[in-house]
Each structure stands twice: as structure tokens, then as C-alpha cells.
Amino acid sequence: MNPPSELRSSNAASQARLRRIEGRHNALVKQIRRAFSRGELTEAGDCAVEGLRVIEEAVRSGVRFKAVLFSESGEKLAGRLLPQIGSHVETLVLPDKLFAGMVDSETPQGVAALVHYKQTSVVDVLERAASGPVVVLAGLQDPGNLGTIVPIARGKTVEILSELGSRGVRVVATSSHKGVLLPEANLALPMAVLVGGEGTGVSKDLLGKADEVIAIPHNPQVESLNAGVAASIVLYEIARKQSALSAPHSGGST
């Protein structure tokens, strides 16, 4: 059974947009390869992403695309993705081997893209503290941990903590071995969670600026928790307590 004419027309239009690249020295290919290998933004502030689901989520989020690249075996995805992406976006097809060498994945999914990273100001993030917790990251070394805690804004930690205090936002610092145990901590909003770097945790001078220090219970044989994991655990506990407070009380009258 042949596909509907509308689908055939869409696929034909998508194929017409694709430009085939054979060499690894193409400027765009080199740019994406560097972005993947270094785990950082390009000089223009673009972020390299890979995979059908991730790219479709980027489309739904309204981010601006610079380029979309398909492997030859992933070219079939063009008919699905390109109608969702503006016609001004550069679209390329690469040999499978060249594509696999460009992306940072052991099992490439056949499509990658450069999207413009939307910058968020410190003020924008701080203004959200009234409705939800803010996470302050101090001394992170692994940029991969940032991907689990978004949106992100850059600033000087001391200045951010001072601004939080002036807005009446409590600062709760995390610690591996000391402080109030997380289940017993006061996690009432508005509040900010201060998370330190891998291994060293929150520095002593920053701990002194916190309103409370909390400890996340874990196996004594574990020296410290991954920063992204620590932040996720605390945020989950905050959400759990907020949900318990807002839930209607059950049981009949006495």
C-alpha cells in the first residue's frame, strides 16, 4: 500500500533540503565534533544534541536550530523532523562512519543538531525562588552534572547568596557527613539548595553563609555523592514534603 500523497510530498520536500557531505573537514562537522568531545557550547553559544527524542523535545521547547545532521542510515528520520524545523536551518547527510566519529555516543541514533543555548539571567532564576527551590552550584568540576539541574544562570556565588538573603530566601547547604539529616530538615519555601563540587563539597566559607546545613544519609563507605545526584535527592524530598502539606487530610471526624 502506497503512502498518502501528502506524506510523499513531505518526504520529497525533506529530501530536497538535504545536502550530502563526504569529508570530515567540513566546518560544521568539525564544530559539532568539538562541541560533543569537549561537552561545552560553541563560540556562538550553540549546544550539540543527539537523538530523535531529544531533538523533538528541543522543537517543542521552541529553541532555535542552527543545523540538523543525519547519518545515511538515519536519513529516513528527515521526513519526520524537517517539517517541524524552519527552512532556513542547514540540513546535512553524512556517511555512517563520519557521523559516528562526530557524535559522543557508542550507539549513534542517526540524527544530531546544533541548537542555540538559551541564556537565563541570575535575576530570572532568583525570581522563581518564591514558587520553587533554587539550586546554587559552587565549584562543580564535571559539566555533565549541569545537565541534570536546569535552567542554569552563571554568577558569583557570594553575590547570589547575598541576593537570596535580601529576598528572604533561606539557604540550605548540603553536606556528606554533618548537619541535620535530610528527612528532619526544614525545607519550607522559599529556599535555595547550595551544592558543592565533586569530592570537596561546599567550602567552609560558603557553609558559614548558609542558614542550615543538611546531611544526605548514605552508606559510610561512600565518600561523597555526585553533585547532580545530591541535588536531585534534595529536590525530591522538597517536592515530597510540599505534596504532603498540600494533600487533603484523610479520615473521618471524631
Image (cartoon, rainbow, N blue to C red):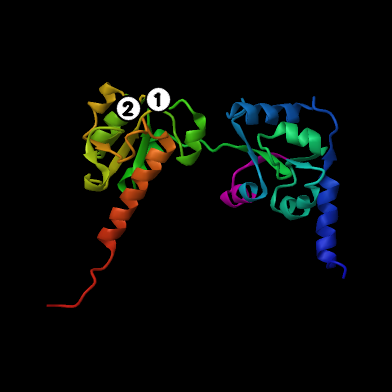
Residue in view at x 80 percent, y 35 percent: 97
Q: Is residue 150 visible?
A: no
Query: Is 253 positioned to the left or the right of 16 in the image?
Result: left
Q: Is residue 58 magenta-colored? A: yes
Give SS at disc 1: loop
Q: Position of residue 137 (x, y in %)?
A: 39, 31
Q: Is residue 60 above or below residue 180?
A: below
> Residue 48 location, x and y as percent?
64, 35
| Residue at image coords 34%, 52% | 239
Residue 81, given in percent of the width and then of the height, sits at: 72, 51
Q: Are marks 2 and 1 in contact (CB under 8 Å)?
A: yes
The reply to whether residue 57 is visible in this rendering is yes
Q: Secondary structure at mark 2?
A: loop
Which of the 4 image quarters holds residue 250? bottom left
- Total marks placed: 2
Three-letter amino acid code at the position of disc 2:
Val
Mark 1 highlights which residue? 139
What residue does disc 2 label?
202
CA gap, disc 2 to disc 1? Answer: 8 Å
Q: Is residue 219 magenta?
A: no
Image position, residue 67 (x, y; %): 71, 38
Amino acid at dot 1: Gly
Badge 1: few (under 14), some or many (20 or more) residues near its Cα, within 10 Å?
some
Q: Which residues are magenta?
A: 56-68
Vertical arrangement, residue 225 with respect to residue 208, above or below: below
